[in-house]
Amino acid sequence: MNVLSAYSEFMQEQKFRGNSNYTLDYYERSLKMFLNFCGNDMDIEDIDVVLFKSYQLYISENLNINRVSVRTYARAVKVFLRWLYFEEYIDIDVNKLLLMKANKDIIVPLSDDEIKSLLNVYDNSSFLKCRNRCIIMLMLDCGLRLAEIVNLKITDIDLKNRFLIINGKGAKQRLVPFGITVLRQFIIYNDYRNNINTDLDSLFLTQRNAALTRNSIKMLFARIKKINGLQRVYPHLLRHTFATNFIYQGGNLEVLRVLMGHSTINITQIYIHLAAQKHLLNDSYQSDLDRLL
């Protein structure tokens, strides 16, 4: 069997499993890069751990992308190779399918002043401004992922009890509460939305009465990044800020794991470190040298 045939079978399996269109697009985009590297006619028996490492080095050296992006593309290939192994198409040591190490940038959550500046970008004077303000508030107050914002339905919101039903990764549902400020914003946005003649159940709509897309939100943040003082803002930073502030204010780590939709607490533990950094920056740090000298 050649790699192209194996790829086609793998994609059929992913569709059968009910993976989202976003996940399918990710596999298709990433694996086609791998197929171009290998050649469609390459026999799958020629696939080994060395090839996987060589592929990562190749895209790292020949594409204008950082190591984090290399890992993102290679992760899909790793899933593909593990599937080939467990289907007994290839015989490799799957424990040696290692991803290239990435240089980890320090995550600095948004400061209170930056949050206020971000919230001041949009008011409620028009449908689009109100919608954008609502999106930003949800990311800051609930820690939602970009895809989770896009997938929100009208029926996912319980205004009376102030919580959202979030359909996260892996078709896992969770309940996420929101505050009074977000409730007020929802009410204003709903007034605008109710004046639109639409049969769509998507919560957030475009000016042309279509469901909001991931690209629409990316373009929204691209415009925000052009504003002085907000150049470092990107969607996931709002999620990091929510989680850091939750721990900073004394929140429980396991509760945060559930709110964030993390499968294990190992992922959530990074926010203990970020909250500790915020304590050092914001609280009155007493230098021992200042005391002595």
Image (spheres, rainbow, N blue to C red):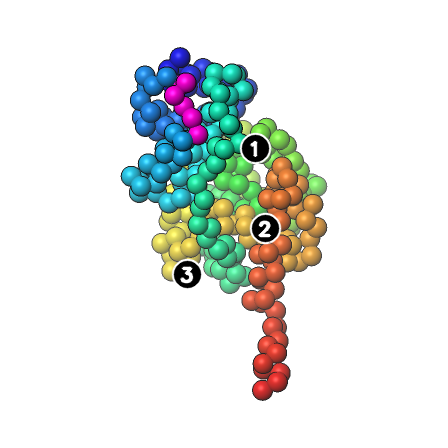
Q: Position of residue 220 (x, y in %)?
A: 41, 45
Residues packed near mark 1 inside 10 Å, few (<14), some (14 to 19) or many (20 plus): some
Q: Position of residue 207 (x, y in %)?
A: 41, 37
User: Is 39 colored magenta in this rendering?
Assistant: no
Q: Name the residue under label 2.
A: 270
User: Viewer-proximal residue, 224 or 41?
Assistant: 41
Q: Can residue 162 be seen in this view?
A: yes
Q: Is residue 242 above or below residue 82?
A: below
Identify the magenta region. 44-49
Q: Mark 1 points at which residue?
A: 169
Check the image and name the residue furthest to the bottom: 293
Say what secondary structure mark 3 lies in: loop
Position of the C terminus by quadrant: bottom right
Of the numbered discs 3 and 1, the one sitting upstream in the chain is: 1
Say what secondary structure mark 1 lies in: helix
Q: Name the residue under label 3.
A: 229
CA distance separating discs 3 and 1: 32 Å
Q: In this view, does 259 lie above or below 16?
A: below
Residue occupying image coordinates x 70% and y 50%: 252
CA distance separating discs 2 and 1: 19 Å
- Amino acid type indicated by mark 3: Gly
Of the numbered discs 3 and 2, the one sitting upstream in the chain is: 3
Q: Position of residue 61 (x, y in %)?
A: 31, 41
User: Viewer-proximal residue, 204 or 273?
Assistant: 273
Marks 2,1: beta carbons within 8 A: no
Residues packed near mark 3 inside 10 Å, few (<14), some (14 to 19) or many (20 plus): few
Residue occupying image coordinates x 59% and y 56%: 273
Position of the N terminus by quadrant: top left
